[in-house]
Image (cartoon, rainbow, N blue to C red):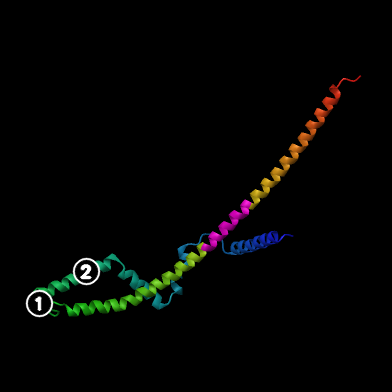
Amino acid sequence: MKPATKIAREFEQAERRLLDELRSLRKGVRTRTELESKPGDLTLGQRVADRVAAAMGSWPFIIIQSAILALWIALNITAFIQHWDPYPFILLNLALSFQAAYAAPFIMMSQNRQQEIDRKEAENDYKINIKAELEIELLHQKIDELREKEVLFLTKAINDLTEIINRQAGAQASGAAPTE
């Protein structure tokens, strides 16, 4: 056996093993909800992080926070009530810094969990793409085999017909020749 043929057969066997492995995986559509952890599987910290990140990344939060900041500034600039935080708004800056310091870890935890979900999803997509590629390659091989069989059949048919035509032409030539 030639080395190239041996390598090709080994490669084909490896492809078939990989394809069989991928086929053994659960069939069906892998949806995003299948990849995500179930709510009962999440720890308390993960649930809190997801809720905090969802709340702080929403328009209602931004609108409410903007309204509170505007009210805070307006009440401290005007003299309707006692100024508890005069102009440089040091107390307001402290409150916003405190909020940012605690919000950032919650958001990062939620993003890390989402990143893990996305990584698993990409890994599954990769496996599905490999499976599709191998399936297509196997279909190409089957079509090539069918084409080769068809070409061999047609070549044999042409040879048989040529032989029949040659025999008939030879018979006509020998029968048409005048006998003396």
For marks 1 and 2, give the CA distance.
21 Å
- Is residue 36 visible in the rendered image? The answer is no
Q: Kindly identify which residue carries mark 1.
A: 81
Relative to 167, say whether 57 is above or below.
Answer: below
Residue nearer the viewer, 89 or 76: 89
Query: Which corner quadrant of the image does residue 131 belong to?
Result: bottom right
Left/right of residue 84 with respect to residue 17 in the rendered view? left
The segment highlighted magenta reads: 126-140
Q: Main secondary structure of the magenta part?
A: helix
Q: Residue 22: which numbered mark, if any?
A: none
Task: Check disc 1 and give the amino acid type.
Answer: Ile
| Crowd class of label 2 (few under 14; some 14 to 19; many from 20; radius 10 Å) | few
Position of residue 164 relative to residue 126, above or below, is above
Q: Looking at the picture, how far across and down is residue 60, in whole percent?
A: 27, 66
Q: Position of residue 31 (x, y in %)?
A: 48, 62
- Is 16 on the left-hand or right-hand side of 43? right
Q: Indicate whether residue 129 is drawn in magenta.
A: yes
Residue found 58% across the figure and 64% down from its top: 25
Q: Nearer the viewer, residue 51 or 156?
A: 156
Picture coordinates of residue 107, whole percent (x, y): 35, 73
Residue sitting at the far front: 180
Query: Between residues 42 and 156, which one lies in front from this camera angle?
Result: 156
- Residue 67: which quarter of the image? bottom left
Marked residue nearer the N-terminal end (1 or 2): 2
In the image, residue 157 above or below residue 148: above
Q: Quadrant of the N terminus?
A: bottom right
